Image: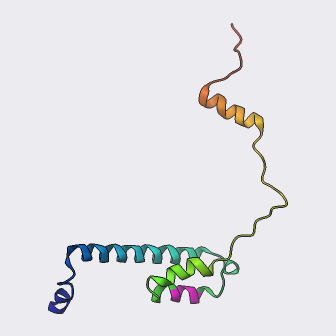
């Protein structure tokens, strides 16, 4: 226990806060990368899943960054058929809900 306290003795408060922030960033990146690799289908990865899990776990801060930069294949986008455009009547219906109807109401 004395060796641990003597190791952090010369760092100071600012250094300890910076070290704590670095540890939190490392853990957040590791958790996000592990969730991503486990949810991603193997066909959308460059290399086997088990290899990327090992890289994420054992190559500390650089492993998750390597995973996000190199391992994921981009999703194929079909540009031949564009997504359905917003219909004008749909936009008018949304505007009517938000701002009230612009059509004159019949008097009773």
Quadrant of the image occupied by residue 43: bottom right
Decide: is 20 above or below 47.
Answer: above
Q: Is residue 40 left or right of residue 57?
A: right
Which residue occupies 56% across, 86% down?
52
Which residue is farthest left? 2
Q: Is residue 51 magenta?
A: yes
Image colouring: rainbow
For the N terminus, the quadrant is bottom left
> Could you say where residue 20 lies in the image, as x and y percent from the top left?
30, 75
Which residue is nearer to you in this view: 84 or 68? 68
For the C terminus, the quadrant is top right
> Could you say where residue 14 lies in the image, as x and y percent from the top left?
24, 73
Which residue is farthest right? 80
Which residue is farthest top? 108
> Could you say where residue 67 lies in the image, as x and y percent from the top left?
56, 81
Which residue occupies 71% across, 36% down?
91
Decide: is 5 above or below 33.
Answer: below
Which residue is nearer to you in this view: 45 or 21? 21
Q: What span is in magenta?
A: 50-55
> Could you say where residue 38 lies in the image, as x and y percent from the top left?
57, 77
């Amino acid at each position: 226990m004395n060796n641990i306290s003597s190791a952090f003795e010369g760092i100071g408060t600012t250094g300890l806060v910076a070290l704590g922030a670095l540890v939190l960033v490392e853990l957040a990146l590791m958790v996000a990368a592990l969730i991503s690799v486990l949810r991603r289908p193997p066909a959308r990865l460059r290399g086997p899943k088990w290899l990327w899990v090992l890289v994420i776990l054992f190559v500390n801060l650089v492993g998750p960054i390597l995973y996000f930069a190199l391992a994921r294949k981009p999703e194929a986008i079909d540009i031949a058929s564009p997504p359905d455009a917003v219909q004008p009547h749909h936009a008018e219906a949304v505007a009517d809900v938000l701002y009230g109807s612009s059509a004159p109401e019949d008097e009773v």
